[in-house]
Amino acid sequence: MAALLETIEKLIIPRLKNELNPGLIYHNIHHTIDVLNKSILISKKEGIDNANDLLLLSTAALYHDSGFLFIYKNHEEKGCQIARKDLSGFFTTEELDRICGLIMATKIPQTPHNILEKIICDADLDYLGRDDFEPISKNLYKEFIDFDILKKDVLWDKVQIEFFESHHYFTQTSISLRQQKKDNNLQLLKQRVQL
């Protein structure tokens, strides 16, 4: 399994490093690697030890934002197409369906249907409950402006407050590791809006 994951990494990581638009300062290779690492961490703490499940989860984490190679909106669907094309020689149709289910679960609003989908969703938005929330958030804001997802006059803190209040972590691991800091980050956003 480790050898197969290494082969898969060699397929997609160089493409993400070299072909993603440099303006993607949030949805970049660093984010993908972070989601991969957090998926592995959360899955271990959640007691996921089936090697095939971990391989499918890790593969989905590597491909979850690969659609950004071509499009911004609906990149999840494009990522599924890329994954199916790249990985058809490595996985069964059923396994590819599971990988695409994991990728699609990360689409906002997140809709996970099983524990692996919950894990990748929590890994994708792990930063909301971390100390590095502010710089990551600034990168996302700049990316949204540069790609016309938001208008320049938007009140970013208000947008974030709405998102925070609609978001919740799905796994007990992320709730215990990230919820308190996420609540603190939300309070800081609310304080700034009141100033």
Image (cartoon, rainbow, N blue to C red):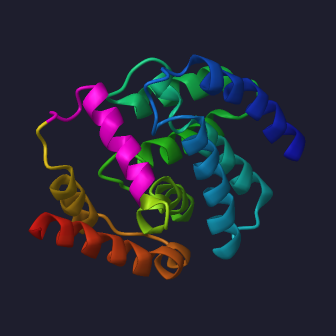
Query: Residue 181 placed where, x, y %?
Result: 42, 76
Q: Residue furthest right?
A: 3
Q: Residue at x 32, y 48 (%)?
A: 108
| Quadrant the C terminus occupies | bottom left
Q: Nearer the viewer, residue 164 or 56?
A: 164
Q: Nearer the viewer, residue 138 or 168?
A: 138
Q: Nearer the viewer, residue 137 or 40?
A: 137
Q: Quadrant of residue 188?
A: bottom left
* Rendered position, 11 above or below 95: above
* Rendered position, 113 above or below 96: below
Query: Residue 117 placed where, x, y %?
Result: 51, 56
Segment tinted magenta in the rendering: 134-152
Query: Residue 97 placed where, x, y %?
Result: 55, 39
In this image, 73 relative to 11: left or right?
left
Q: Residue at x 40, y 29 (%)?
A: 75
Q: Quadrant of residue 17?
A: top right
Q: Residue at x 19, y 66 (%)?
A: 192
In this image, 51 relative to 134: left or right?
right
* Rendered position, 91 above or below 182: above
In this image, 23 relative to 48: left or right?
left
Q: Residue furthest front?
A: 195
Q: Residue at x 29, y 35 (%)?
A: 144
Is residue 123 in the magenta section? no
The kind of secondary structure the magenta stretch mainly shows is helix
Is residue 136 in the magenta section? yes
